[in-house]
Image (spheres, grey):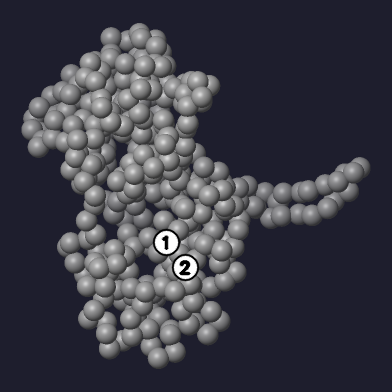
Amino acid sequence: MNKERIKVFISTLPLTVVEAMAKIDSHASDAGILFIVDSSQALIGCITDGDIRRWILKGGELTASAEAVMFKNPVSLPVHEKNRAKSIMVEKSITAVPILDSRYRIIDIVILKEISNASLSHKSLKGVPVVIMAGGKGTRLYPFTKILPKPLIPIGDTPIVERIIDCYVEYDINEYYMTVNYKKGMLRSYFNDLSPQYKVKFVEEDKPLGTGGSIKLIEDKFDRPLFVTNCDALIRADYADIYEHHINSGNDITMVSALKNITVPYGVVNSGVNGELLSMEEKPTLSYFINTGMYIINPETIDLIPADTLFHMTHLVEKVIKSGGKVGTYPISEDSFLDMGEFEEMKRMEQKLNIISEK
């Protein structure tokens, strides 16, 4: 790895948690890690996206120092042992190993995905059902959706819904339910012609029932928690970890939430009594977690969905909370959520998937 590329994996303190998330997102790989060095460039710690997620789930602030999150004894290798990197990563289930000189300075970084076709294996989710909500008209993508249903709009040369399913296929999932309405015949025809190795069962709405109401039409009974997802967003995360988090947390519903950073394009003024100026902040960034439209729900929650009624997943979330159930979140980074709801977001998705250049 050349010196310029190494720099994107390295940072110094002071650094906030949200800044660390942004730096991890900037990587061109799926290493999901940031190495922290001191003023002499010696390695003093590392932060992974998993470390940040656990911090957030414990109620940690995004504005907290990354030092509170970082692991202070990261795995590393001296130059003469660089050939051990692959075996160390596989053994310890880590994605990257820094190579250090005699002063503990990083002179190379070995990334598992880049040196081996066999990345860290996913835990199998075989038998877990997935419901894909694909009945909407996609009005924000008009006039494309005048011709095609939103799920079949291509990202590169592959429809978005196929890309979404491919993410689940990596975890051995082969059972999919697709709720359809608008241009449903085209969706059926596409998958009939595709003849995939997995099974897609179509659930047809006679009228719009919302993102939650259509689930009630599924006749099969589920005996385990299931994924429910929109048809217009890709989630780049460890689906097995999301599922395990749902089970271990005892949630009735787990909502996958993504960080969203919004920069105010003006100088913000803070004033006190009688308009006295207290401070100014130039173009501050506000950070929030947003709903990605991906959930894991327990089968029992489906009983709370009214039949033949327009009902959204957010309504189900509210109903579960009101009935004393437990709703949790699973936070992911900003660039782990790729949405194609609008044209500009489609371009961003293609760039992040390396389908088109960023020019």
Pick out the residue farthest to the right. Answer: 274
Estimate the x, y position of residue 327 in percent, counting from the top left. Answer: 47, 32
Would you say residue 169 is visible in this rendering? no
Would you say residue 278 is visible in this rendering? yes
- Three-letter code for the amino acid on which mark 2 is drawn: Phe
Estimate the x, y position of residue 28 in percent, counting from the top left. Answer: 34, 62
Estimate the x, y position of residue 269 in percent, counting from the top left. Answer: 76, 49
- Three-letter code for the amino acid on which mark 1 is drawn: Thr
Vertical side of 39 occupied by 95: above or below = above
Q: Quadrant of the N terminus?
A: bottom left
| 26 or 324, nearer to the observer | 324
Estimate the x, y position of residue 94 in percent, counting from the top left. Answer: 31, 65
Crowd rating for badge 2 (residues with CA inside 10 Å; few <14, some 14–19, many 20+): some
Mark 1 and 2 residues: CB-CB less than 8 Å, in contact?
A: yes
Pick out the residue farthest to the bottom. Answer: 102
Quadrant in the picture for residue 245: top left
Name which of mark 1 and mark 2 comes first in the sequence: 1
Residue 34's tag is: none
| 173 or 287, nearer to the observer | 173
Quadrant in the picture for residue 14: bottom right
Residue at position x 43%, y 84% in the image: 105
**Pointer 1: what residue?**
48
Residue 71's tag is: 2
Crowd rating for badge 1 (residues with CA inside 10 Å; few <14, some 14–19, many 20+): many
